Image (cartoon, coloured by chain):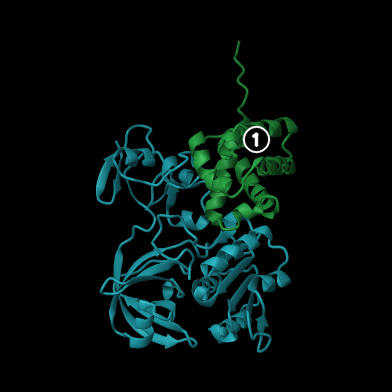
Chain colours: A cyan, B green
C-alpha cells in the first residue's frame, strides 16, 4: 500500500483513494471544495510521482513545471511526499551588495552557501535574524550566482528602511521560498510575450525578459514599465541596450506625470499598451506591481484577448506564502 | 440484445475540454456586459475564473459538489447588493450565447439553461 508523506507524517493510502481523501481522513486540513478537479482549491506540490500529469489538468504551465497538482485528482500508486503551496524551508544568505538604482529603489545582492533553486521572476521571503520578514521578487537569473532583489524605500517600512538606511552589507539573512507563478516556461519560442510592470514590479520582469532571451525566445517580447514620474523608472539604460541587441524585444516606458520627453511616454500604462497592441489574442502576459493596478490591468488584458490561463500575476491562491497579492 | 445507454449531457458537450473552451468566452461576455459587470469589479480574476469554471462544469451536467446551501452562501453578498431575477436572466442568456458561439446545438443549450435555471432560488436566496 503506498503512503503519503506530509509535514513529517506518513499516511497510508487506501485502495482507490485520492491524495485529498487520504489526507483529510488522516486529520490533515487541506483546503478543498469541488473534489472534481475543477475549482483548484486543493492545489498541492509533489516532487515527482507517477500519474502526476493526469492530476495537473487545467493548471498553468508554470505550476506544472514546479510539480503542483490537484490533490483530489491523484490516486497514488507509489509513495510520494506532498506539501501545501508555500511550505518551503529556509536558506541562509549573506548580503553582498547594495546599490541605488534610482532615488527610492535599492538593488540588493545576496549570496547563499547552499544552492538556491528558483525560476527567474519568482519571489522569496527575506527573513532578518530577528524574524522580520518581507517578500521580494527575484530580478536575477539562476546562473548568475548572486541573487538580486529590488527594494523600494517605503517610509516607515521596517525592512526597506533597514536596507536603505543602515546598509547592512555582510549581514546574514534567511531566505524562504521561492514561490510564485511569474516565470518563463520554454517550449513555445515564437509565442508573443507581454511584460507589464509598475515601480519595482520591474524586478521579476527584468529576470523573465533576460531568461526568455537567454533561452532563445524568437517571438516578439514587449516590455512596458510604468511609474508615477520619470524618476521612478530605473535600469533604463540596461534595457535599452538589451532592446538594441535583440530586435524582437520592444521596451516602452511611461510615466503618469511629467513624461513626454527623453523616450518616456506620458499617460496610463494600459493606454500605452492599447496604442501599440490593440489585439492581444495569442499573447502570454506577465503583470507585476501594485496589486490594485495589477488586478485592473489583468482584466483589461483579458478583455483585449489574452486567455485567462495565459495571464501570470501571482495574485495567488489563499494558502500561498503570506505576501502582498502580486509580485512586487 | 445490447442495452443502449445514451451519453450524458456533459459527454455530449465534450466534457472538460468543452468547459475549457467556454470559460474565457463566457467570462469575457460577463465582464463586458454593463447589466452585470459591476458585480465583478472588485473580484480577483484567478479565483473568479476558477469559480466560472466550476459553475460551467455544473451547468454542463458534469461532476460537482455544489449544494443549495453553497449557492446561497456564495451569492448572499451579491443579493445584498441588489442581485435580482433580471441579472440571473442575463447570465443565463450569456451562457446560451457562449454555447451558440461554440456551435452547440439548440436542444443541448436548452438542457444547460435548465440546469442553470434550477439554481435560481438558491442564487437569489429565496
Q: Residue at x 64, y 78 (%)?
A: A252
Q: Residue furthest top?
A: B1
Percent position (x, y) of residue A22? 33, 39
Which one is in front, A203 or A120? A203
Q: Check the picture and name the quadrant holding the N terminus of chain A.
A: top left
Question: Is residue A94 visible from the viewing direction of this image?
Answer: yes
Q: Is residue A247 above or below residue A9?
A: below
Percent position (x, y) of residue B110? 70, 32
Percent position (x, y) of residue A214? 53, 72
Q: Is residue A272 above or below residue A166?
A: above
Percent position (x, y) of residue A159? 36, 77
What is the count of numbered marks? Answer: 1
Q: Is residue B109 left or right of residue A228?
A: right
Q: Residue at x 60, y 62 (%)?
A: A298
Label 1: which residue? B13
Rendering quarter of residue A179: bottom left
Question: Is residue B67 visible from the viewing direction of this image?
Answer: no
Q: Is residue B72 left or right of residue A1?
A: right
Rendering quarter of residue A157: bottom left
Chain holding disc 1: B
Q: Secondary structure at mark 1?
A: helix
Q: Residue at x 64, y 86 (%)?
A: A258
Q: Residue at x 50, y 73 (%)?
A: A207
Mark 1 residue crowding within 10 angstroms, few (<14) / some (14–19) / many (20+): many
Q: Is residue B41 left or right of residue A9?
A: right
Q: Is residue A73 above or below residue A179?
A: above
Amino acid at each position: 500500500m503506498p503512503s503519503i508523506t506530509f509535514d513529517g507524517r506518513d499516511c497510508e493510502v487506501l485502495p482507490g483513494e485520492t491524495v485529498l481523501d487520504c489526507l483529510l481522513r488522516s486529520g490533515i486540513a487541506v483546503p478543498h471544495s469541488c473534489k472534481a478537479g475543477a475549482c483548484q482549491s486543493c492545489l498541492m506540490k509533489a516532487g515527482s510521482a507517477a500519474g502526476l500529469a493526469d492530476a495537473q489538468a487545467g493548471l498553468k504551465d508554470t505550476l506544472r513545471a514546479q510539480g503542483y497538482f490537484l490533490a483530489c485528482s491523484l490516486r497514488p500508486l507509489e509513495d510520494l511526499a506532498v506539501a501545501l503551496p508555500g511550505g518551503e524551508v529556509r536558506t541562509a544568505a549573506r548580503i553582498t551588495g547594495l546599490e541605488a538604482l534610482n532615488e527610492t529603489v535599492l538593488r540588493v545582492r545576496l549570496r547563499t552557501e547552499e544552492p538556491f533553486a528558483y525560476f527567474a521572476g519568482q519571489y522569496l521571503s527575506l527573513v532578518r535574524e530577528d524574524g522580520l520578514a518581507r517578500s521580494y521578487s527575484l530580478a536575477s537569473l539562476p546562473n548568475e550566482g548572486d541573487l538580486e532583489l529590488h527594494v523600494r524605500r517605503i517610509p516607515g517600512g521596517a525592512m526597506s528602511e533597514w536596507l536603505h538606511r543602515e546598509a547592512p552589507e555582510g549581514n546574514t539573512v534567511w531566505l524562504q521560498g521561492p514561490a510564485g507563478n511569474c516565470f518563463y516556461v520554454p517550449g513555445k519560442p515564437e509565442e508573443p510575450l507581454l511584460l507589464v510592470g509598475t515601480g519595482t514590479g520591474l524586478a521579476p520582469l527584468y529576470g523573465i525578459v533576460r531568461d526568455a532571451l537567454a533561452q532563445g525566445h524568437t517571438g516578439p517580447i514587449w516590455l512596458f514599465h510604468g511609474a508615477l514620474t520619470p524618476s521612478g523608472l530605473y535600469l533604463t539604460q540596461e534595457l535599452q541596450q538589451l532592446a538594441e541587441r535583440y530586435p524582437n524585444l520592444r521596451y516602452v516606458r511611461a510615466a503618469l506625470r511629467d513624461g513626454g520627453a527623453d523616450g518616456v511616454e506620458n499617460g496610463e500604462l494600459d493606454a500605452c499598451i492599447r496604442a501599440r497592441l490593440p489585439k492581444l489574442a495569442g499573447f502570454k502576459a506577465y503583470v507585476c506591481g501594485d496589486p490594485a493596478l495589477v488586478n485592473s490591468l489583468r482584466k483589461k488584458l483579458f478583455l483585449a484577448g489574452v486567455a485567462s490561463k495565459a495571464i501570470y500575476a501571482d495574485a495567488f491562491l489563499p494558502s500561498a506564502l503570506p505576501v502582498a497579492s502580486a509580485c512586487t | 440484445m445490447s442495452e443502449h445507454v445514451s451519453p450524458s449531457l456533459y459527454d455530449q458537450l465534450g466534457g472538460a475540454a468543452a468547459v475549457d473552451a467556454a470559460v474565457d468566452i463566457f467570462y469575457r461576455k460577463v465582464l463586458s456586459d454593463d447589466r452585470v459587470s459591476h458585480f465583478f469589479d472588485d473580484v480577483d480574476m484567478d479565483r473568479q475564473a476558477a469559480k466560472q469554471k466550476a459553475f460551467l462544469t455544473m451547468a454542463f451536467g458534469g461532476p460537482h459538489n455544489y449544494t443549495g446551501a453553497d449557492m446561497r452562501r456564495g451569492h448572499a453578498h451579491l443579493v445584498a447588493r441588489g442581485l435580482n431575477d433580471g441579472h440571473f436572466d442575463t447570465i443565463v442568456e450569456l451562457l446560451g450565447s457562449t454555447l451558440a458561439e461554440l456551435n452547440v446545438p439548440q436542444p443541448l443549450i436548452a438542457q444547460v439553461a435548465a440546469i442553470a435555471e434550477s439554481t435560481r432560488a438558491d442564487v437569489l436566496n429565496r
